[in-house]
């Protein structure tokens, strides 16, 4: 079950008996990440267990991903990887919009409508609005990584280890 669908406050354990935090740390050690890619794990591990995600935490998470470009408009910031949009941030409402699969969009909105709302669907993907005051930083990091992964080209995804493993 994806971490996004687990009840809040639970530590999850994989088949190997390690907690999800242990798995992220082990993956970082195994792959001996350097440079920008290691910032993904550093950001996630530093934020692990945070009660509520803050705008700065979102910006740190998104900025730690490989080849992310951020552009600022009057109302919101847009986040792209190699020209493809994967997220938005609206400072006034303290919300983010993230690209997800259609099934993940539906599951998130159905499970916690006070935290997630359907934004729109496009090109076989579902975009969700995330209210930062309702989500923990580790769950937000997973959703941001997934949004990035859905937009990044395959050759780029191949060189960045999956945060869930």
Image (spheres, helix red, strand yellow):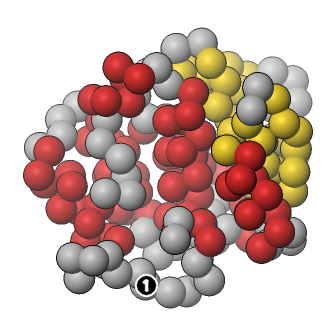
Q: Nearer the viewer, residue 60 or 162?
A: 162
Q: Residue at x 23, y 62 (%)?
A: 25
Q: Residue at x 11, y 44 (%)?
A: 32
On screen, residue 104 versus residue 41, left or right, reads: right
State the residue position of label 1.
11
> Residue reaching furthest top?
83
Instruction: Choose between 122 and 10: the one closer to the eye.
Output: 122
Q: In which quadrant of the rendered view does residue 27 lie?
A: bottom left
Q: Secondary structure at mark 1?
A: loop
Image location of residue 80, percent across then percent down: 60, 23
**In the displayed structure, does residue 160 sit left or right of residue 78?**
left
Would residue 69 appear left or right of 126 to someone viewing this image?
left
The answer to whether residue 62 shows anywhere in this view is yes
Q: Does residue 113 lie above or below 129 as drawn?
A: below
Query: Can you give x and y, in whole percent of width and height, for residue 102 in the image?
Result: 74, 46
Q: Is residue 49 above or below residue 108?
A: below
Q: Residue 77 sits in which quadrant?
A: top right
Find the residue positioned furthest to the bottom.
10
Q: In the image, is 120 to the left or to the right of 54? A: right
Q: Residues within 10 Å of mark 1 (few under 14, many from 20)?
A: few
Residue at 58 percent of width and 52 percent of height: 143
Q: Quadrant of the C terminus?
A: bottom left
The answer to whether 83 is drawn above or below residue 64 in the figure is: above
> Which residue: 79% across, 72% down?
112
Q: Give coordinates of residue 76: x percent, y percent.
A: 81, 31
Residue 92 placement (x, y as % from top left): 87, 46
């Amino acid at each position: 079950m994806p971490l996004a669908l687990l009840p809040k406050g639970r530590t999850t354990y994989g088949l190997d008996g390690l907690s999800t935090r242990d798995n992220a740390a082990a993956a970082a050690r195994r792959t001996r990440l350097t440079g920008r890619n290691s910032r993904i794990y550093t950001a996630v591990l530093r934020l692990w267990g945070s009660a509520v995600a803050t705008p700065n935490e979102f910006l740190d998470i998104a900025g730690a991903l490989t080849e992310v470009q951020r552009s600022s408009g009057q109302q919101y910031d847009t986040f792209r990887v190699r020209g493809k949009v994967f997220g938005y941030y609206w400072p006034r409402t303290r919300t983010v919009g993230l690209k997800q699969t259609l099934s993940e969009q539906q599951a998130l909105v159905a499970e916690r409508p006070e935290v997630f709302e359907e934004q729109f669907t496009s090109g076989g993907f579902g975009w969700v609005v995330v209210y930062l005051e309702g989500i923990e930083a580790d769950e937000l990091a997973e959703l941001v990584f997934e949004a990035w992964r859905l937009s990044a080209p395959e050759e780029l995804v191949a060189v960045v280890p999956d945060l869930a493993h």
